[in-house]
Amino acid sequence: MSDPEFFYTIDRTVTAEFKDRGSKFIAYTYPIQSVDDFKKNIEAIKKEHPKATHHCFAYRIGLDNNTYRVSDDGEPSGTAGKPILGQIDSKKLTNILVVVVRYFGGTLLGVPGLINAYKSAASLALQITPIIPKPIEVVYTLQFDYTQMNEVMTQVKQLNCQVLEKDMNLFCRLVIGIPKGRLEEAIYKFKEIRNVEISKSNL
């Protein structure tokens, strides 16, 4: 059962290999946060495997289910990217890219064979990639006087908040991600500190 206070992702790259009738399918899993991360990783893979026949992939980013992309990279439509995404979704993962590199082995696999090969390669890689829960965060902005910095930062650490932006002058501004499960506690604690303004952010 998925816990609404957490999402599931990965924090490292893992490789797995699947072979079928001479063709070699090498799957890579990558943790990504943005489309830019995806672009860097796909470029690196193409440099690493310049002679591969295809570099097929699927990625999913964020929690709204709207940011994803699949590519068959020249394979028959629907035979590579969708099966890879299917494996990502079967494990309910996000902020992840899976690339499957194919070296053609001389025998055509046909549509069912291709779907099976890309699905199997992605599945093997995901089976050996450690999956980690991460807290879903709600973004808030804190504004406070420089003299209150220590008090504020102590609470940020204790509540496991993530600092997303900081602007430290005489008057400080801090944008933080508060774990959803600790939101009420966090708002209470920050409001307890004198003269701290806390407001929901649209980041």
Image (tube, helix red, strand yellow):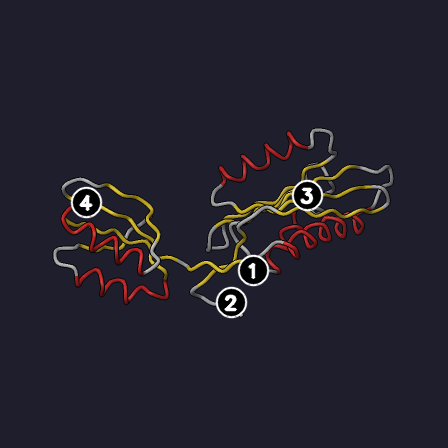
Rounded to the nearest angstrom, the CA distance separating label 2 from label 4 is 37 Å
Q: Amino acid at mark 4?
A: Cys
Residue at the image position 54 percent from the left and 40 percent from the top:
38
N-term mark: 2 or 4? 2
Q: Are marks 1 and 2 in contact (CB under 8 Å)?
A: yes
Q: Secondary structure at mark 4?
A: strand
Query: For mark 4, does the 10 Å Cα neighbourhood hold few (<14), some (14 to 19), or many (20 or more) residues?
Result: some
**Residue pointed to by mark 2:** 2
Where, quadrant-wise, is the N terminus in this rendering?
A: bottom right
Q: Amino acid at mark 2?
A: Ser
Name the kind of residue labelled 3 in the image. Answer: Val
x and y, in percent, of residue 143 in the image? 19, 49
Q: Earlier in the sequence, mark 1 or mark 4?
A: 1
The three-letter code of the residue at mark 1 reads: Lys
Left or right for 138, reference 149: right
* Crowd around label 3: few <14 · some 14–19 · many ≥20 (10 Å): many
Residue that badge 3 annotates: 100
